Structure formats: C-alpha cells, structure tokens
Amino acid sequence: MTSRSPAPRSGRRRALALAAAAMAIGLLAGCGDSDDEATDTTDEPASTTGGQAAADEFCAAGDELRDDVEALADIDIVADGVDGVREQLDTIQDDVAALRESGRDVAADEIASLETALDDLRTAVDTLAGGDISADNARDAIDAIGAAGRAAGSVRTELDQACP
C-alpha cells in the first residue's frame, strides 16, 4: 500500500512558498520607487488639521508599513510555515491601520483600498493554507497579490507626495 500524504503536503508547501514569494514580490513592486507616477508634489504637511506632528506620525507609519512589507520577502516558508506569512500579514494590516489613523485626511481612499486588498489576500492565503489548492484558488491568490500590490503602490505614491 502506498501512502500519498507526503506528496500532497509537499505540494501544499510548494504552493504556499510560491504564494508567499509572489505576495512579497507583488507587494514590494507596489511599494517600489514610482518616479514616473508622481503628480502634485507639494511640501504641504500630511495633515492640514494636525500640523507637523500629524505629518510626522503619518510618515513614520508609512515607513513602518514599507519595512514590514519588505520583511515579507524574508519569511522562510519552510521554517515558519503559513503561520509566518499570516503573522507578517497581521503586522502589515496593523501598519495600515496605524497609517489610516494617523492620516485620515491624507490618502483615505487609497488606504481603504489597501485594507480591502489585504483582507482579500488574507482570505486567499487561508484558503490555500487550508489545503484547497485548486487552479481557481491559485488564480484568486495571484489576483489578490496583484490587487494588494497596486493598492500598496497607490499608498506609496501618496506617502511620497506627503513625506519629504
């Protein structure tokens, strides 16, 4: 009698590793340098109601978000497993919440879009981690990675404009 459990587990690990790598690449691409996308680059503070302190808080939250998105690429999926990916997604979602709270009047639409995209990405990762590795679910994960990357890029553009 042959056991099939190692192959599916190995396949699941490979799929999760691929998803984590693609997620990191997609989000990093979204947070990459976007010189050609800059539109209005004024030296206005990030918050018109909170002055420089609010601008500093917003920019610091943006720096944390960038650092934690970059850390996603450093996750060792074999050693840390899907829990490592989930923990880093939690950290990134916390960063986005801090960004939202610090800059309500700056990039509110972009931040809301990023929150939605990260929620969708979390769902896709959880689905794959649960062992439901179908072509449709893999496509959903890839789509979620792309949407999160695009949303992160929009937030990055706003950060670049608001934070010197």
Image: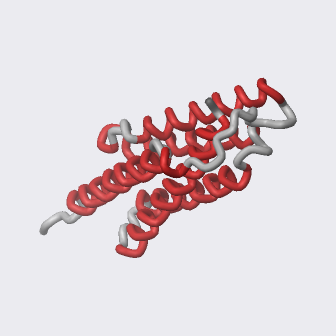
Residue at 57% over, 44% down: 156
Residue at 60% over, 44% down: 93
Query: Residue 154's x, y, as percent?
Result: 58, 52
Whether residue 100 can be seen here? yes
Query: Residue 64's x, y, as percent?
Result: 57, 32
* Number of numbered callouts drawn: 0
Q: Is residue 110 left or right of residue 84?
A: right
> Residue 85 occupies which quadrant of the picture?
top left
Whether residue 83 can be seen here? no
What is the quadrant of the C terminus in the image? top right
Q: Please, which residue is most extreme toward the right here?
A: 49
> Residue 47 occupies which quadrant of the picture?
top right
Between 78 and 64, the one lying in front of the other is 64
Query: Residue 50's x, y, as percent?
Result: 84, 31
What is the quadrant of the N terminus in the image? bottom left
Between 140 and 52, the one lying in front of the other is 52
Q: Is residue 108 left or right of residue 123?
A: right
User: Is 67 above or below relative to 90?
Assistant: above
Query: Residue 146's x, y, as percent?
Result: 46, 60
User: Is 133 above or below relative to 111?
Assistant: below
